[in-house]
Image: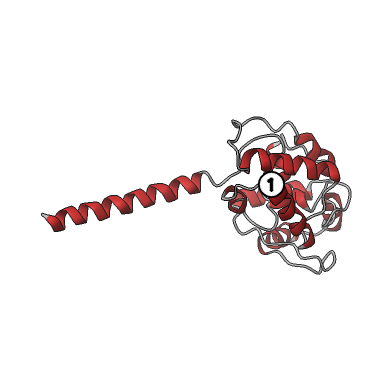
Amino acid sequence: MFLRRLGFGAAAAIAAVAVAQDTVAQDNQLVSGPGVGLVNAKCGTCHDVTHIIRSKLTRDEWTDNFENMLKRGMPPATDAERAIILDYLVAYYGPNAAPPPSADTQAGAAAQATGIDLGDPVGKLLNSSGCTACHAVDKPLVGPPFKSVAERYRSDAGAAARLAAKIRQGGAGVWGQTPMPPNAALSDPDLKRIVDWVLAQK
C-alpha cells in the first residue's frame, strides 16, 4: 500500500510539474499595456521576454538594467521611448501589484519610429519577432530600411530564399558588420509572410 501511495504521489507530482510547465509556455509573453510594443521591439531583439517576466524590479533597478543593455548593444532609444519602456516595466514587472492588462496606448511611438503599422497583422509579427528594433520602413536604424532591402533584391529571383535564410540564421557582412541575431523560433508560414512583406516594399 505504501508503494502504491508513493507511486500515486510521484505521478501526481509529475503531472503538476507538466501543468506548470505548460502554463509557463502559454504565458511566455508580456502583459498587454501601454508601451508593450516598444518593450518587445527594443528588448526582444537580444533575449526572450522570460528575462523580464521573471523579474520584479524597482524603477532604479530597471533603469540600471536598461542602461546596461544599451551599453551591451541594445538598439538605441530616444528619451521619450526610454520613459515609455521604463514606465511599462515598473507598472507590470515592478515590486507592486500590476494593473490589469490594457491596450497599448503608446503603440504610436513605435509606429512613428519605424513607419510600421503595429495594428496590421504583419506589423504585429515584425514587432513581436524583434524586427522593428533594428529596421524601419524607409530610414536606417541599426540595420537597413526595409525599402532598401527590397530594392537591392528587386531583380533577384532567389531573393526570397536568401532573405529567409538570413532571417532564420542571422549573420553580418551584407549591410555592414553589425550582426543580425538569428530568429530560429519563427514558424515557416510567419517567416514567409515577413519575407513577402519586405520584398514588396517600394
Relative to residue 61, is residue 170 depicted above or below?
Answer: below
- Residue found 15% across the figure and 58% down from its top: 3
x, y percentage for residue 193? 67, 47
x, y percentage for residue 175? 84, 64
In depth, the one of 78 and 129 nearer the eye is 78
- Residue found 79% across the figure and 55% down from its top: 75
- Please say whether residue 124 is visible from this viewpoint: no
Q: Which amino acid type corresponds to the residue marked 1 in the rendered image?
A: Asn
Which quadrant of the figure contains the C terminus? top right
Residue lying at the far right of the rendered structure: 139
SS at badge 1:
helix
In depth, the one of 64 and 144 nearer the eye is 64
Q: Is residue 104 left or right of residue 177?
A: left
Q: Is residue 34 left or right of residue 134?
A: left
Which quadrant of the figure contains the N terminus? bottom left
x, y percentage for residue 69? 74, 58
- Residue found 81% across the figure and 65% down from its top: 178
In depth, the one of 2 and 94 nearer the eye is 94
- Residue found 85% across the figure and 66% down from its top: 176
Relative to residue 97, is residue 179 depicted above or below?
Answer: below
Name the residue that disc number 1 marks.
40
In depth, the one of 26 and 96 nearer the eye is 96
